[in-house]
Amino acid sequence: MGENTGNKNHLHQKQVFDLSLDVHAQGGSKCFDDDDRLKRTGNVWTASAHIITAVIGSGVLSLAWATAQLGWIAGPTVMFLFSFVTYYTSTLLAACYRSGDPINGKRNYTYMDAVRSNLGGFKFKICGLVQYLNLFGVAIGYTIASSISMMAIERSNCFHSSGGKNLCHMNSNPYMIGFGVAQIIFSQIPDFDQLWWLSIVAAVMSFTYSTIGLGLGIGKVAESGTLKGSLTGISIGTVTETQKIWRSFQALGDIAFAYSYSIILIEIQDTVKSPPSETTTMKKASLVSVGVTTLFYMLCGCFGYAAFGDLSPGNLLTGFGFYNPYWLLDIANAAIVIHLVGAYQVYCQPLFAFIEKQAAARFPDSDFITKEIKIPIPGFRPFSLNLFRLVWRTIFVILTTVISMLLPFFNDVVGLLGALGFWPLTVYFPVEMYIAQKKIPKWSTKWLCLQILSFACLVITIAAAAGSIAGVVLDLKSYKPFSTSY
């Protein structure tokens, strides 16, 4: 991994941050911070907005299903516990923004910078591996989710035009291929950090579909006048005892996926002004944003479960499939697709940048890797084409699309991603960095409490991963590759 994982590549993580940096830069301020960069102007509210934008994504759609597996008692309790752990570990991570002195110490601009400063080279490489694998997995999850939403639009329109006579079964592959083609085109834009507008569009879209999902859930409960569901979740009989256990584990992964934002917390913190210290501001911002997100998630998960009970769908918006007003569902599903087109690029850019830097460092004399070909575009600045970028990014998108077509199971993939990213990135590294930074003595009470927290989260992660893998294995038994129809 080495030094190549530079500052710039991680600012791609979520484009919203670039907007904040951009706006400040354009302010024409002549004042500089202690690291000779333009003075940061972020505060509690801008940081909270960034976190909420980053967190509320497609993970919200599987929360009704997750609540249905766990029931009225365990579902909200687990969501609350995850929000507490996420908040607590984010405060530990915020304390690692500066190395040494908390006021004037050296700044760490990215999550991986913080790992390198506090834990050294080996753990830095492990962190990079986990992070990039997670980004690769997210690309697959987003491809599956977008195809499901595109099919939901097509099916609801088909169903209404046939007056409900046609069940409108269809294959997901053409939609995944279409999404892949769009991503091949978008991924050729070299300086994606300029496209901050895409992130704003994505943020607006995520609020749009989440709010429509919540509104429809409330409407359905009001219409039927009953709250469905039970205290212990989906009943044995609807599923077998073994399935109940695996699906409960998988629900943990789905909830973990919906909360994950640690990977971009340091980048958000790097937009915040001081005094007060960046850590103080970030702790307040984490409290505000995790509080708002938890409230929103509780409403979406609980109203979705109240509306559908045991039949809660894996993806809330496709569950309303054939209900009126169907145009509203079409808007929500279109919003998901637009959001995912942008989110896919935001998540893949750090991975693209890392591979390209490694290749350029390894083969500095290769024209194929380093030569930029300028293609004039009338009325715009010339487009910069690089052959290595063209070939490698295209192969990457094709690979994620093919894997998505082989494993088109939204819920299982979301659960697995949540499980794999939750313990290492949200709990283990923040806890270890905090211990190293604060020099907490081994076997002291605080050290023991932090290790118990980390171990408990590791157990949850293993259970969630096992549940998701069991779900995939179960799905594969009744599944023929490339011929999925809904």
Image (tube, helix red, strand yellow):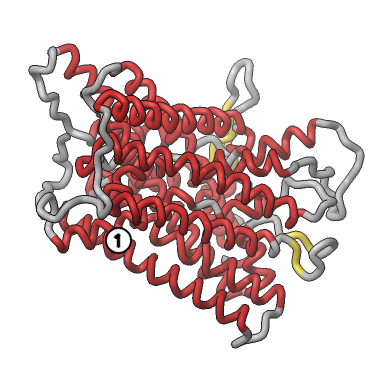
Which quarter shows the N terminus? Answer: bottom right
Residue 459 in picture, x, y percent from top left = 38, 71
Q: Residue furthest front?
A: 225
Is 330 displayed left or right of 371 in the figure? left
Residue at image coords 52%, 48%:
368
Residue 17 in picture, x, y percent from top left = 65, 41
Residue at image coords 31%, 51%:
413
On the image, which quarter does residue 410 sit in?
top left
Closer to the camera, 206 or 325? 325
Closer to the camera, 248 or 218? 218
On the image, which quarter does residue 304 sit in?
top left
Vertical side of 173 occupied by 201: above or below: above
- Which residue type carries mark 1? Phe
Which quarter shows the C terminus? Answer: top left
Residue at image coords 26%, 33%:
226
On the image, which quarter does residue 198 sit in?
top right
Vertical side of 219 occupied by 435: above or below: below
Q: Residue furthest bottom?
A: 443
Residue 255 in picture, x, y percent from top left = 40, 52
Closer to the camera, 318 or 180? 318
Vertical side of 326 occupied by 29: above or below: below
Local crowd at mark 1 within 10 Å, few (<14), some, or many (≥20)?
A: many
Q: Residue furthest right?
A: 30
Q: Which residue is disc 1 drawn over?
A: 249
Answer whether residue 185 is visible to the viewer in this image: no
Vertical side of 168 occupied by 42: above or below: below
How many numbered discs sit on the rendered protein?
Answer: 1
Is 482 displayed left or right of 135 in the figure? left
Q: At numbered mark 1, what does the secondary structure look like: helix, strand or loop?
A: helix
